[in-house]
Image: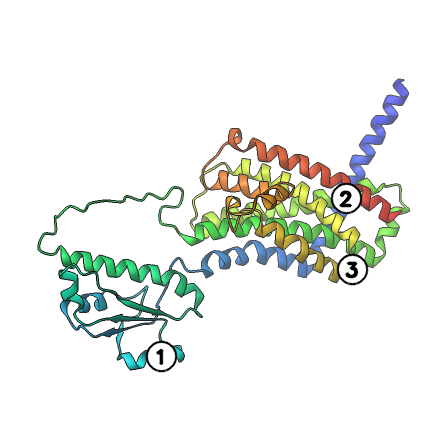
């Protein structure tokens, strides 16, 4: 019995040594691949920075024109209320110029103030103002209409109450934004880009590592050595997960928190623990996709079919509560759903382990299932 126990322990030590040495081989192969290194560097530095800063927090320098048929004190106040940086200074045009100028794309918004507008406002007749919007400029058109309406209502309200500035309003709304008081787009965009990039790079690196072995013929060399399919797969999982985890940690500290000044409310070590669980799942998924694909172009096509739905339906772009119930149930099986859930809880709300233990547990279960399925598939493939 003692001899059998020693033999078993020696076999386990040898298996661990094989996994470690094979993982080092994967790391050395990655170091010799400059294109893959450049992809990792770009994805976790410039890619995160551009994604966070490219989308403006609000409209900027929107072109607006005003048709002022009233030419009153109130209409001039409204015209003068539009100024940079949100709007360019309002241009005054005639009614006949509205269609030609908007057809030419010169103005995104054209405001038409009718005759006797000030008189009707003071008389309480609730006059209407026409706002023409060029909806082909989707980003400005979507948010600009709300800004213009708010500006007009503020100017009309202050004009009507100018004789009694202290007159109390019937209702006062006080809005407080939790976790992102100024609704800064970079705070949300940078973290979500990091989350998406972790998933994308983990699948790409593990899938590419296996396909590269097959295309170069080195996979057959490994199979004639005293190593098993489990050891080959496990070595690729831990080595590629380590690379992505290190890159993600540096990106979070130096790019997101350092360059973009995004506050990290929760524990970074707790978040990295969750990242490790997520990488265990998605690297296994990458191995599975690599066993289905025969070459890199096929792997790229599979990534589009698998990665895009996982990222779009995980709750990072749209709240899961807004999705159909069937989609929510199906996405419970995706690791990205639970990754987004605990990442937002930790980084945005400062949640501790007592809050995120459930997504951690579900991610561990999903990762184990994906690893076993991928291992069985990989073993059959190499057989």
Res. 295 mark: 3
The answer to whether mark 1 and mark 2 are in CB contact below 8 A is no
Q: Earlier in the sequence, mark 1 or mark 2?
A: 1
Distance Cα–Cα, label 1 vs label 3: 54 Å
Task: Name the spot of residue 381 as percent of width and height, x first.
Answer: 85, 49
Residue at which label 1 appears: 99
- Residue 336 image position (x, y, % from top left): 60, 45
Residue that extends furthest to the left in the rendered view of this protein? 163
Q: Position of residue 187 (x, y in %)?
A: 44, 50
Instruction: Give the CA distance from mark 1 to mark 2.
Output: 61 Å
Q: Is residue 54 left or right of residue 225?
A: left
Q: Nearer the viewer, residue 37 or 339?
A: 339
- From what the image shows, is residue 18 above or below residue 221? above
Residue 89 seen in the current view: no
Q: Is residue 92 above or below residue 238?
A: below
Q: Residue at x 75, y 48 (%)?
A: 287
Q: Is residue 19 above or below residue 120?
A: above
First reached walking from the N terminus: tag 1 or tag 3: 1
Quick one: SS at disc 2?
helix
Q: Earlier in the sequence, mark 3 or mark 2?
A: 3
Image-quadrant location for residue 231:
top right
- Numbered disc in front, either 1 or 2: 1
**Secondary structure of the residue carrying numbered label 1:** helix
How would you rate the neighbour count of disc 1 (Cα within 10 Å): few for under 14, some for 14-19, many for 20 or more?
few
Residue 314 in percent (x, y) is at 57, 47
State the separation of the CA atoms marked 3 and 2: 17 Å
**Residue 374 seen in render:** yes
Disc number placed over residue 22 in the picture, else none: none
Q: How many marks can you see?
A: 3
Which image quarter: residue 380?
top right
Which residue matches tag 2?
374
């Amino acid at each position: 019995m003692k001899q059998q126990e020693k033999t078993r322990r020696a076999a386990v030590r040898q298996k661990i040594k094989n996994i470690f040495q094979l993982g080092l081989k994967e790391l050395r192969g990655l170091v010799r691949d400059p294109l893959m290194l450049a992809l990792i560097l770009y994805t976790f530095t410039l890619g995160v920075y551009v994604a966070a800063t490219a989308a403006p927090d609000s409209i900027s320098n929107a072109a607006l024109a005003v048709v002022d048929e009233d030419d009153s004190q109130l209409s001039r106040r409204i015209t003068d209320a539009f100024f940079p940086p949100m709007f360019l200074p309002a241009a005054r045009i005639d009614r006949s110029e509205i269609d030609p100028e908007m057809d030419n794309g010169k103005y995104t918004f054209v405001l038409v103030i009718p005759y006797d507008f000030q008189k009707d406002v003071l008389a309480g007749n609730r006059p209407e103002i026409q706002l023409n919007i060029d909806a082909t400029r989707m980003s400005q058109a979507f948010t600009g209409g709300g800004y213009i309406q708010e500006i007009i209502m503020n100017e009309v309200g202050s004009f009507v109450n100018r004789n009694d500035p202290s007159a109390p309003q019937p209702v006062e709304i006080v809005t407080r934004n939790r976790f992102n008081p100024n609704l800064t787009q970079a705070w949300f965009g940078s973290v979500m880009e990091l989350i998406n990039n972790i998933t994308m790079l983990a699948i790409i690196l593990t899938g590419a590592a296996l396909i590269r072995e097959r295309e170069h013929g080195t996979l057959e060399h490994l199979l004639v050595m005293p190593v098993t399919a489990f050891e080959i797969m496990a070595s690729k999982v831990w080595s590629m997960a380590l690379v992505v985890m290190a890159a993600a940690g540096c990106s979070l500290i130096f790019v997101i928190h350092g360059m973009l000044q995004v506050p990290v409310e929760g524990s970074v070590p707790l978040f990295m623990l969750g990242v490790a669980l997520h990488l265990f799942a998605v690297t296994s998924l990458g191995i599975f996709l690599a066993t289905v694909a025969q070459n890199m172009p096929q792997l790229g096509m599979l990534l589009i079919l698998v990665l895009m739905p996982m990222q779009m339906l995980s709750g990072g772009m749209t709240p899961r509560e807004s999705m159909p119930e069937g989609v929510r149930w199906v996405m419970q099986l995706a690791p990205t759903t639970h990754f987004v859930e605990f990442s937002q809880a930790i980084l945005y709300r400062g949640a501790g382990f007592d809050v995120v233990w459930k997504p951690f547990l579900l991610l561990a279960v999903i990762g184990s299932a994906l690893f076993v399925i991928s291992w069985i598939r990989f073993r059959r493939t190499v057989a």
